Image (cartoon, helix red, strand yellow):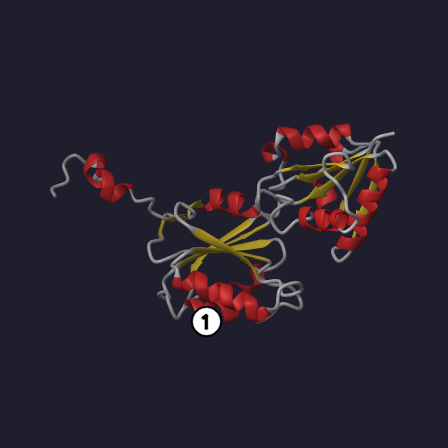
Amino acid sequence: MTGKLYIVGVGPGHHDHMTFRAKEVIEESDTIVGYETYVNLVQDLIEGKTVHRYAMTQEVERAHQCIDLAKSGKIVSLVSSGDPGIYGMAGLIYETLAATNWNPKDGLQVEIVPGVSALNSCASIIGSPLMTDFAVVSMSDLLVPWEIITQRVEAAAQGDFVIVIYNPASKKRIHQLEDTRKILLKYRKPTTPVAIIKGAFRESQTIVMTDLENLPNHSDQLGMISTVIIGNSSTYTYKDLMINPRGYKSKYNLEEQTNPNLKV
């Protein structure tokens, strides 16, 4: 009996935005595995299926169980919030399989079903902050040393990248975002726009528009389901939206075309 393992992105967290393929493979699967919060996002799609729920810190156990179940002949969906290939379970699954000399051509069938990552969903909610080059950095130093993370932040700040921050804070992660803010203030104005999006596209969604100077005043909005987007030198706000110019203004005389009476 041949099984299969799907690594499914169910992001951003609302069924209207889940991909058709994600819904399709979840329906095809007889077994669902995932972090409890992510399993709850698809609760109405998994009735009658065998479900294995895990706590946040049991990623390795999750990976091994998924692989073992699929090898036993089960059709398994490992559900992941957002996109499984961006800070998700795809990497751990492939690392685990690679350690067993797994051959993708004739071994266990594995398919990644991409989802909508937090950077996509959050950006769409607040406007167009990612119109030019951007960097994505996680504040989690469980797997990456904090010294390396600060080096990456410094490089992104020097390069004038818009910066998307995943995992900005937790009960144990207190100083990281403030350290990052101090690094950015070496290169950016205190008035640089910042957006905090919590629970994007979920019923609990909240949005705070602020700036680098006032970011510490909104610590109550920071957590594991929060994403922080920090603008670059070109980013500006307009009626609670964050806009990053794409460059058309200078290339196509955008203002003149928008307002024919504008004198240049």
Tell me residue 1's x, y (percent): 88, 29
Asked whether, in this view, residue 151 is left or right of residue 78, the answer is: left
Label 1: how many Cα within 10 Å (few below 14, some 14–19, many 20+)? few
Going by the numbered disc 1, the residue's amino acid type is Lys
Q: Is residue 149 above or below residue 260?
A: below
Q: Is residue 249 visible?
A: yes
Tell me residue 152's x, y (percent): 50, 63
- Residue at the image point whose x is 57% and y is 44% from the top: 117
- Residue at the image point whose x is 42% and y is 48% from the top: 129
Tag 1 residue: 182
- Residue at the image point whose x is 40% and y is 45% from the top: 131
Asked whether, in this view, residue 92 is left or right of residue 127, the answer is: right
Q: Looking at the image, which is closer to me, 22 or 202?
A: 22
Q: Looking at the image, which is closer to me, 207 or 118?
A: 118
Q: Label 1's element?
A: helix
Q: Is residue 4 above or below residue 36?
A: above
Q: Quick one: quadrant of the C terminus?
A: top left
Tell me residue 39's x, y (percent): 74, 43
- Residue at the image point whose x is 61% and y is 39% from the top: 115
Q: Is residue 66 above or below residue 58?
A: above
